[in-house]
Structures are given as structure tokens and as C-alpha cells.
Amino acid sequence: MHFNSLPFAIFLPVVFALYWFLSGRKLVYQNLLLLIASYFFYSCWDWRFVFLLAFSTFLDFISGLQIHRSSTRSQQRTWLIISVVINLALLGFFKYYNFFVDSFAALLQQFGFTPHHSTLNIILPVGISFYTFHGLSYVFDIYNRKIAPTGNWINYALFVSFFPLLVAGPIERATHLLPQVEKAREFSYAKSVDGLRQILWGLFKKMVIADSCAGYVDMIFNDHAAWSGSTLALGAVLFAFQIYADFSGYSDIALGTARLFGFELLQNFKFPYFSRDIAEFWRRWHVSLSSWFRDYLYIPLGGSRGGNWMRIRNTLIIFLVSGFWHGANFTFIVWGSLHALFILPSILFRTNREHLEIVAPGKNLPSFREASAIAITFASTVFAWIFFRAADLDTAIQYISGIFSRSLFRLPEPDTYSKGLLFLIAVFMLVEWLGRENKYAIEKAGLIRARPVRWLFYSAITLTILSYGLKNSEAPHEFIYFQF
């Protein structure tokens, strides 16, 4: 069930109505309803993997209780290891089994061996990387004595499987979401309207910007040898906008949907393409994953407390693991490695904490220096996105070689883009720029006092979504991060 589908348009208001009908009764009824709805939502992808989700949830629920009840640190560590090993084993099997088998066979062939190996036709359970990290953060926080475990399985299961965030995040923490699950919630008209507004903006990002870019990106990347260098460069830029609008659009819909039920999820995107360096980019892109790796891997490894060697080592580990988290392909590892190389100078010279606030606060335009820094950072991320999008390393290298050719200095082929799309992207980024100091770009649209103007604005976005939704319906594109 996709957020941008008719079934979800029916599912959401039904669950919303039943949920608030139960308001004022026992909290367990509301939580149980959301839990049932979440499992139904997940079963619409593949009902068989509901049992995997339930097993992972039960494992971490029991592990958390046992860690808390254990009288010695060694017993607590044992239960932590059990949870981590089983969770990562399941994740590794479903996501990386074929990758490791094929890679090992290729390595043996380099030494003259021809192994007979077979790979399994394994279906990747949607959202496994996300709900696995939900559970791991829970047991880590109990082990580190940041929280006490809950004894209520319904509350914990809802924390893990809450349907807005289940299949593509954000990656929530028990310290943030679980207290909201355990506390009674009251209906707020203002929050519900705000949630609907963020859902509207998320649908615009996905159905208008991302899906419109997708067709051109697929055409260019799938036949990269046929296009000029300028067209290949344009394809990489369009993919940068596609993946941002696609993933941040999903997050906007998730956050807005959660707000309809009285929950506040972690903000996952903070206008990353307005970053002035790569360190700032990673504080603004997929924030829940970046902060997860920072808190549960980077800091335990020593963080930045040691000398240069330790900072370099820890940074490389973080980005290599981040790349591998995204998928079983060397392209993702190279993508992560490139970002590690991009960020290392700021780590070594301790300038990685310079840009903590959004660029040019309270101003209409950035300074020339800020604009130049934004352009350089964006160009660096676009270059890395080529590896992220390419089918394999050879394709990525050929694609980059094609860009840096004489044909880079001629206009892109007219069939590989539309002026209407470029105009939409420009308008989209202008709205994002004007709303960059808010949680999402059109958050302050509700403050427009003139009701006709406000509703005209909402109607224009809605009609654009419907128009492009019908236009792109013949070749629908799933949310990109469903594959992770």
C-alpha cells in the first residue's frame, strides 16, 4: 500500500475516524487499533513477512526486559549480543546473502578457481533495515541505561511498527516515540490541519517532482552511451532532485500522517541542498540514520576524542557502513567512501561544526560566499549520486567518463528533459528556500490570513498533484527507499 495510492486514501481516513472515536476510552484501545492497522498496512506488501516483523519485535522486547532484569553486566551484555546477532543475521541473510556469495565466488575466480555456487531467490522484506534499527536502538538504550524497558508488548510493538514510519523511516528512537505511545493523546484541530498540509507537500514532492524526474533519469542512465556529456550531467542533476523529492516527500507524508494521530516523529530532512559543506549536508540529509550511526557506532568507537588517525578511521567506518546499509552493491560502498573523502578535511581541521544553523537566516538571499559554498557542496553530492544510481561500478565509471568529454559543452538533447519540468523544479526549490527556516517548506502557509488566497494556494498544489499523478500513472515509480 503506497502513500500515493487510492487504497491508502481510503485506509487513512477510516483508521483516523476509528482512532479518534476511541478517544477518551482506555489508551490501550487506541494503541491496539493502530497496531492492527500497522500490521494490516505491512501485510499489503507481503503477508508472509508479518511473521518476521513480529519475531523481530518479540526478540527485542524480551531482550530489553532481560537486560534490565539481569543482575550483572556480563548477563546484560549476553542478552544484548543475542539481540544484535540475531537481528543482524536476519538482515544480512535477506539483504546481503547473494552479494556475499557472488563476491566470494568472484574473488576465487581471480585466483584461478571456478567455484560452483548458487544464490537464492530471496525477496527483500520491505522496511527490514528500518524496523531492525528501531529495535536495536531500544536494546542499546536499555543496555546504556538511558531508558527502562516497557512491560507492555502492545506499546512496544506499536513503537516498532507504527505504519507511517514502518517501511521507509524515519528511524525512531524509543526515547522519543515510546513515551508518546504510552501517553494519552487528545485531538487537536490545529495539529491535524498542519499534518494534512505536510502530507500535501510530501505528495507534491513525490508525484510532481520525483516521478516527473524519474522518467528522464531512467532514460538517460539506462542508455548512457547514447547521450552527450551535457545530457549525462543533466541526468545526474535530475536524479539528485528525484531522490531528494522522493525520500523527503515520503518523510513529509509520514510526519504529517503521524501528526493526525497525535504523534511527532523525528524530522528526517532539513533542506540538505542548501548546505555549505558536506558535514552540514549530513546533518540535514536522512537525519535519523545519520544520528543513529553517530550515537550507536561513531561515538562508541571513540568519536572525535582521539588523534587524527582515530577520527579518520571512525569517519571511514561510519560512511562505509552507511553505504552498505543502503544496499548489497559496491556502488553504495563507493558512494559512502566518496562522502567520507569529502568530509575528511573538515574533520581534520575541525571545521565540521561551523554551519549549525540554516544558511542566511532572516535574509532573502545568501551572500556570494554562501552561494558558492552551496553550489560546490551540491555539485559534490551530485557526483556521488551517480554511483548511488548506477547499476554497477563499470556503468558509473562509463557514465562519468561520458560527462567529461567534449560534448559536455553543448546543449542537452531536447528529448531528455522538458522546460516545464525545469520550471517546476525551479519553483519547488524557491518554495523550499523561502520556507527553509521551518520544519517543512509550506508550514507557514496556514498563517496566510486571507482565506481565499490560502485555499487558492492549497487548490493549486492539489490540482498539480492530480494532474501529474494521472500523467505519470502509466509508469508508476515506487518510493526509492522501499528497496532499502
Image (tube, rainbow, N blue to C red):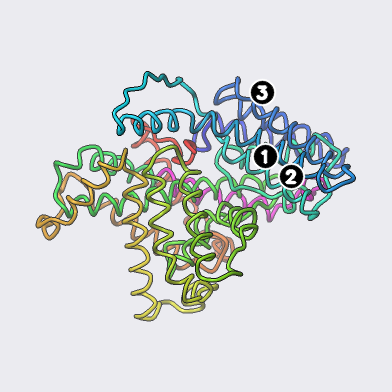
Residue 14 sits in which quadrant? top right
Q: Residue at x 53, y 29 (%)?
A: 94
Q: Position of residue 295 (x, y in %)?
A: 64, 57
Residue 281 is a magenta residue:
no
- Number of numbered discs present? 3
Label 3 vs 1, first from the N-terminus: 3
Q: Quick check: 323 left or right of 52?
A: left
Q: What is the x, y in percent for residue 469? A: 40, 38
The tag earlier along the polypeptide, 2 or 1, is: 1
Q: Which mark is residue 317?
A: none
Look at the numbered disc 2 and give the secondary structure of its residue: helix
- Disc 1 residue type? Val
Q: Quadrant of residue 424?
A: bottom left
Q: Position of residue 367 (x, y in %)?
A: 38, 81
| Residue nearest the viewer, comparing 135 with 257 | 135
Q: On the rendered image, what quadrant is the N terminus found in?
A: top right
Asked if 355 appears above or below 424 in the picture, the reply is below
Write the residue at 23% across / 43% down: 220
N-terminal of the pair, mark 3 or mark 2, is 3
Dot label at residue 84: 1
Residue for point 61% across, 49% down: 255
Q: For residue 51, which numbered disc appears in the image?
A: 3
Amino acid type at image mark 3: Phe
Q: CA distance from mark 3 to mark 1?
A: 19 Å
Compute the Cα span from label 3 to label 2: 20 Å
The region drawn magenta spans 179-207
Residue 453 in view of the camera: no
